[in-house]
Image (cartoon, grey):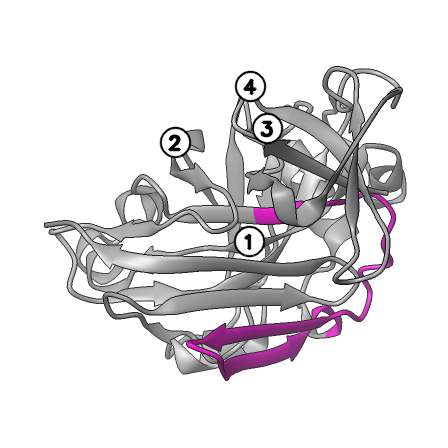
């Protein structure tokens, strides 16, 4: 299923997306499907008549994975780490489809990073890769926005990747997906700048979720970003970045500069 969080001008609600591209409808469901079975209310609305929101606002944490594609590590001038490189992003960085990414005054070199995001559905700790399929709720698109100059200056990544609006997620959560070899394409104002596949990940989804669970208790709604392929680069005020992942959809956000 494609689970969306959306509004029609009132309180946010959840729904299931059905239909062919250009003719999708949202079937409203009761409550939060992360914590209860999907029960339809009977209300339905054309997708074009709703505003999609971030499909999940993590109550606990977003876990980022650095340099998980060899070609990206190479373009950053380093070797891939032998083990998954993890960092934390505050949940205040999360925004949804169409929301502006606000570039801060402190940085003059903000980059896009298109990524596959994993949404955790069950509390877990110290799980094996074989158990990961039982704790994953689904997958969505992410843009791990990075203030590259601050990343270099600070020597650690919390500020560079943690500004408000720096973690767009969406457009919805796909609950069933084979992530072994998915096309991942990022566009800047319509031009392809990243063209990769999840098959090129150094550490696959099962390895990453298991590895994260060795360090942190993973809670329902936690999000794990799985790394970005080569092709990252700067964004200027007024530009738009789209992250399209096969089997999920397209996440699109404009970039603005704080005045």
| Residue, disc 2 | 92
Q: Which mark is residue 11?
A: 4
Residue 162 shown left or right of residue 136 in the figure: left
| Residue, disc 3 | 216
Real-space Cα separation, disc 4 to disc 3, in angstroms: 32 Å
Front residue of 181/27: it is 27
Q: Earlier in the sequence, mark 4 or mark 1?
A: 4
Residue 84 locus on image (x, y percent): 58, 54
Q: Residues within 10 Å of mark 3 (few under 14, many from 20)?
A: few
| Residue, disc 1 | 142
Q: Earlier in the sequence, mark 2 or mark 3?
A: 2
Question: Which residue is rendered at x = 74% and y = 57% of the image?
Answer: 248
Residue 17 shown left or right of residue 176 in the figure: left
Task: Report the magenta stretch's main SS.
Answer: strand
Instruction: Answer whether residue 178 is magenta in the image.
Output: yes
Question: Which residue is rendered at x = 62% and y = 37% of the image?
Answer: 55
Q: On the image, which quarter does residue 257 sit in?
A: bottom left
Q: Is residue 37 visible?
A: yes
Real-space Cα separation, disc 2 to disc 3, in angstroms: 19 Å
Residue 46 locus on image (x, y percent): 73, 44
Instruction: Answer whether residue 168 is magenta in the image.
Output: no
Up the image or down, 103 lies above or below 236; here it is: above
């Amino acid at each position: 299923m494609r689970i969306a969080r959306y509004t029609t001008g009132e309180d946010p609600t959840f729904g299931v997306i059905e239909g062919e591209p250009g003719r999708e409808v949202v079937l409203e469901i009761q409550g939060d499907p992360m914590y209860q079975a999907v029960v339809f209310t009977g209300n339905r609305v054309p997708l074009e008549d709703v505003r999609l929101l971030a499909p999940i606002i993590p109550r606990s944490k977003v876990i980022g994975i650095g340099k998980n594609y060899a070609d990206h590590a190479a373009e950053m001038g380093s070797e891939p780490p032998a083990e998954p490189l993890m960092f934390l992003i505050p949940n205040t960085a999360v925004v949804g489809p169409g929301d502006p990414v606000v570039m801060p005054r402190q940085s003059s070199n903000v980059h896009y990073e298109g990524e596959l995001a994993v949404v955790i559905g069950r509390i877990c700790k110290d799980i094996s890769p074989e158990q990961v399929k039982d704790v994953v709720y689904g997958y969505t698109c992410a843009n791990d926005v990075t203030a590259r100059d601050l990343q270099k200056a600070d020597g650690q990544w919390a500020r560079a990747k943690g500004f408000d609006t720096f973690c767009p997620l969406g457009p919805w959560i796909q609950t069933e997906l084979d992530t072994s070899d998915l096309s991942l394409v990022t566009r800047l104002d319509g031009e392809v700048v990243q063209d990769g596949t999840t098959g090129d990940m150094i550490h696959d989804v099962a390895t990453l979720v298991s590895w994260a669970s060795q360090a942190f208790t993973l809670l329902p709604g936690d999000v794990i970003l799985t790394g970005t392929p080569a092709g990252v680069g700067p964004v200027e005020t007024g530009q738009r970045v789209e992250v399209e992942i096969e089997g999920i959809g397209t996440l699109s956000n404009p970039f603005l500069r704080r005045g």
